[in-house]
Amino acid sequence: MLAYIGRRALLAVFTVWAISVLAFVIIQLPPGDYVTSYIAQMAASGSVVSEEEADNLRIQYGLGRPIYVQYYKWVKLFAEGNFGMSMEWKRPVTEVIGDRLWLTMVVAVSALLLTWVLALPIGIYSAVRQYSLGDYAATFVGFIGLAVPNFLLALVLLYLGFTLFNANTGGLFSVELQDAPWSMAKAWDLLKHLPIPALILGLAGTAQQVRIMRANLLDELRKPYVVTARSKGLTEGRVILKYPVRLALNPFASTIGYTLPYIVSGSIIVSLVLGLPTVGPLLLRALIAQDMFLAGTIVLLLGVMTVIGTLVSDILLVWIDPRIRLEDS
Amino acid sequence: MAVDSKGALTAAPRETLLSVRNLKTYFPQDEGTVKAVDGVSFDLYPGGTLGIVGESGCGKSVTARSILGIVDRPGRIVEGEIHFRRRAIDGGAEADRMVDLATLAPNGPEMRAVRGAEIALIFQEPRSSFSPVHTIGNQIDEVIMLHQQLDRRQAREKTIEMLRRVGVSSPEERVNQLSNQLSGGLRQRAMIAMALSCNPSLLIADEPTTALDVTTQTQILALMRQLQQEDGMAIMLITHDLGVIAEMARDVAVMYLGRVVEQAPVDEIFHAPRHPYTQALLRSIPRIRSGPRERLTPIAGSVPHPYDRPSGCPFHPRCPEFMPGTCDRQAPSLRLVGDQHAVSCFLYE
């Protein structure tokens, strides 16, 4: 077990390294180097960068040295928590991303949790009571959830919230607390604002997972080991939850890896509509403005999130299905 | 077997362990009702072995599942009685009593108390009849803890002891293995260990050796016979293999399309079969004394589609003794033709 997790963790570290190379390549792609575009930016806004300052920056980033030295310097700055300057915002990338990173995580994780909390029981019910009224209802709502683009849903909810309750359902905070320092009141405010974006972002995923759970469980319910479990005299609920559901959980767990970053990058439009302070819209702007340090950093962070998600699902999978561990060794 | 004045089977005398009367289990579907079991009657005595033979789809397995109350949706018992003698509660304060399992709620507490503890099931698929993600020990412990007042540690000891009894080598290690780490024969042994762990009075074995190679098959059958002698349980052996029947059963019930067409002691079935179907079935298997190039006689026609059951006697379209006007109009009932020999055929009415 430990050996398996160790091997996976080692692979994860290797993957993160590969992602960092990719992020570095993205940063290097635009013509010129960082300093030339920095000087151009400064010139555009009317200030002048002295030769001395430019040279210092070149030395700091190792520009003009071989590419692997540049990469090394970049990674080294990283370790110090310095992700470079954002061209567009003229502030360090860390400052620009700031709270957005973990607010993004909060939104993504709550959307994921909501997906699971809704999809698991509905999927189980749909399979166990196949072709019942409840199954048809879940299927109907599920397909609507899949078919409606989530930004449209966001607009509809905003409109309804505004006309029916005269409430602004957008954002993650109330206007008066937007720029306030962190406090219990602000945290509570966040919790109150969270359900709507979580629901909107989670709905399509929920519909998909309900279908997956239903299909998997239907397959598992026909297997002989379910008959064995029933013939032991267990209650029907225990039979279903201990045996077929556990096997049907497999694809659920294996999707965590890509669901997390998908919610982040897939939420760009919803975040724009709802005015959510997450990294999604920031990435979009950074890509349009060729703000490569910001874009590279976000791509790197998304990559790391995927790797962490995959590691978590790998560990969950061995717990769910011990055969995986055996095959691996 | 008991008979009333008209010669039809009636309620069995008190000493039967299981007595099934006119059992009907139907599966309502959009295309029509599948009458998987359509009026089955038979008796099983304590410690006895009843073989149930028939082609695929004749309702053998559904009969077994009806007794256990685990018929798959949308199937259900629509008619009939399943009288089962429940074990006396410890201390003998209450004598053993007959319960009609057909009237119990399939997932109610009494049915679940019988299932696994007093009637156990083993079946064909040794590959998939254990959960692939739980250890063998976990799955056997579970049934022991469910029906006996034992804690986890005592249950595990009992599990190991049961595995040793059924001939699993180094059971202390096997308990922690997954089913795919065991061979087919070992899996079926573990399955038997699980079924017998609560000392049931009836073991239903549904094609227990079909998926095993011949050597393993012989070993498993020998094991079942040995355990039956030691524990005194009754076995209801469902199979399409007449060889297995000859080796194991004392009494045989032959099923065709959801009905018992003939029931008799094993010797009479093999040496003096009365029903045309049983006769045809015996002609269709190879004999050790037959000539080298002698052809087998297959049963004419094929098993009708479940939605398209023949009227009258279900066997009449394939029957060499078909009597027009009788067999296709009315359904015969099971009647005694000998001391313990019952046949459902108009030839004997």
Image (cartoon, coloured by chain):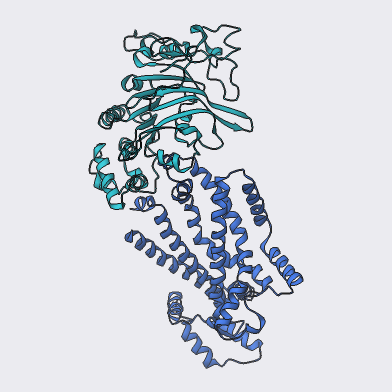
Chain colours: A blue, B cyan
Q: Most extreme residue toward the left, as rendered?
A: B170
Q: Is residue A326 something one can see in this rendering?
A: yes
Residue A279 position within the rendered picture, expressed as x and y whole percent measured from the top left: 58, 74
- Of residues B59 and A92, the one nearer the viewer is B59
Res B312 quadrant in image: top right
Quadrant the N terminus of chain A occupies:
bottom left
**Residue at 54%, 71% in the rendered image:** A106
- Percent of width and height locating residue A194: 60, 71
Q: Is residue B244 left or right of residue B230?
A: right
In the rendered structure, the answer to whether residue A88 lies left or right of residue B63 reads right
Q: Residue at x 51, y 37 (%)?
A: B72
Q: Is residue B131 above or below residue A282?
A: above
Q: Nearer the viewer, residue A5 or A189?
A: A189
Farthest residue, direction front: B93
Residue at x 43%, y 63% (from the top left corner) = A311
Above or below, A180 relative to A300: below
The front one of A151 and B26 is B26
- The image shows residue A30 at horizontal and vertical percentages of 58, 74
Q: Is residue A28 visible?
A: no
Which residue occupies the extreme right position in the image? Answer: A163
- Please provide percent x and percent y for residue A235: 46, 46
Residue B95 vs residue A79, the one in the foreground? B95
Give the total of numbered labels: 0
Tell me where residue A87 sits by quadrant. bottom right
